Image (cartoon, rainbow, N blue to C red):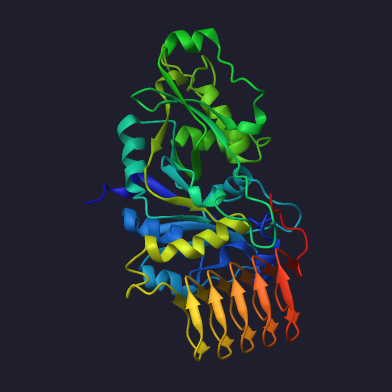
Amino acid sequence: MHPNMNDFQAVVLAAGKGSRITDLVSCDEFKCNVQIGNRPMLFYPLRNLKNAGFKEATVIVPNKYRADENIAKELQLHIDYVNVNVELEDQGTAESLRLIKDRLKPNRHVLLVSCDLITDIDLSELCVRQRVSDALLTLLLAPLPTQLTECAVPGSRKKFQPECDIVVLQTGTQRLLKFGAAADFAENVTFRQKLVRQFPSMQLHSDQLDCHVYALHPKAVEFVLTHKLLATFKGEVLPKLVEKQFSKKDLRDEDRSKADTLDTLKCYALLSTSFALRANTLQAYKIANGEVKNIFHDLFPGGSENIFKEKTLLHKVQAKKSVIGARVTIGTGSRVLSCVIQDDVVIGEGALIQNSIVCRGCKLGKNVSVINSFLGARTQLGEGKGVTNESVGISSMEFE
């Protein structure tokens, strides 16, 4: 049984350009359309919201985005798509929220969710924590997936180094006392003496994934809307809100008593032990495609180690632990091992494709060898060609 979600408005951030996965985005026009397990990544957080008890969601998308009506139909979820202009520069997540202020319902808590989240965590637990504690903010944390560092990034010889955050929580209550990217701290994490006296027992975490899921009190929403110089939620708004909970003057109504300060509105974290991943890098995208069938058993029934889409032609092909898109043709005797093969790809006979990403429209000749590589959209490799640890047809994606 899920709690009543009438106190919440679900908002999905899906207007980002995907600056770390530019060549993947070029295949699907928009980041939120990038296919994971042969479904647009936007499908997964919307499914999380449906499963948490939400009946509707507001989704912020780029101006030229055309809504995929199949998502709403499959999920039986009312989706309000709000188109925003992202042509000039990448809009920060906080700015995206300000752009839809007229669509925000008054006096509602906002559940803010990123479109690249892949998880089966029950988001209703976060909402319950938010309402029971009447928190200013509650954020969702999960263990950093070990898969991120276990293998090389396709197209690179380097191991992936995931970004780490410093999260400091009060022992027992999981009250959020400090938050920031590890790169923003010097060698030491410092604390004010007053904070240490008030919270003598703390836990510092550097191995948690910020899932980019935030439950916001109406006062936190108002703070975001009025502080227009704060562009990004995680980098600017979140640390400010954590600091403000100890303020004696900010974010309080004028008619409150002097004793009723922001300290009565606390920030918390919900630590989940379940798998969660943000598919916002090439490595994470590859892992997400490999994990969805293990996470969402009802979406991928049958126990197959591969995921196939319609009109895919395979004849005497060895395929293992791979996601293969629509209208793909793979020649006799070819092997596809631990790969993502997007739509409209043609692979000749006798090919070996291993631990690689082959983007939409590629044409690979007979007996090609593609190992731990990334092939951008519409790449062509002639008969007998081989690439290892290479990126072909790529522009400026980040690999580190």
Residue toward you, 16 or 341? 341
Q: How many marks?
A: 0
Residue displayed at 64% across by 88% down: 348
Residue displayed at 35% across by 44% down: 7
Left or right of 330? Residue 205 is: left
Which percent across, then down, holds residue 350? 61, 86
- Can the viewer see residue 131 in this picture? yes
Residue toward you, 296 or 291? 291
Residue toward you, 220 or 204? 204
Outermost residue to the left: 1
> Residue 186: which quarter of the image?
top right
Residue displayed at 53% across by 82% down: 326
> Residue 192: which quarter of the image?
top right
- Can the viewer see residue 42 in this picture? no
Which percent across, then down, holds residue 311? 50, 89
Which percent across, then down, holds residue 279? 55, 56
Q: Is residue 76 above or below residue 352?
A: above
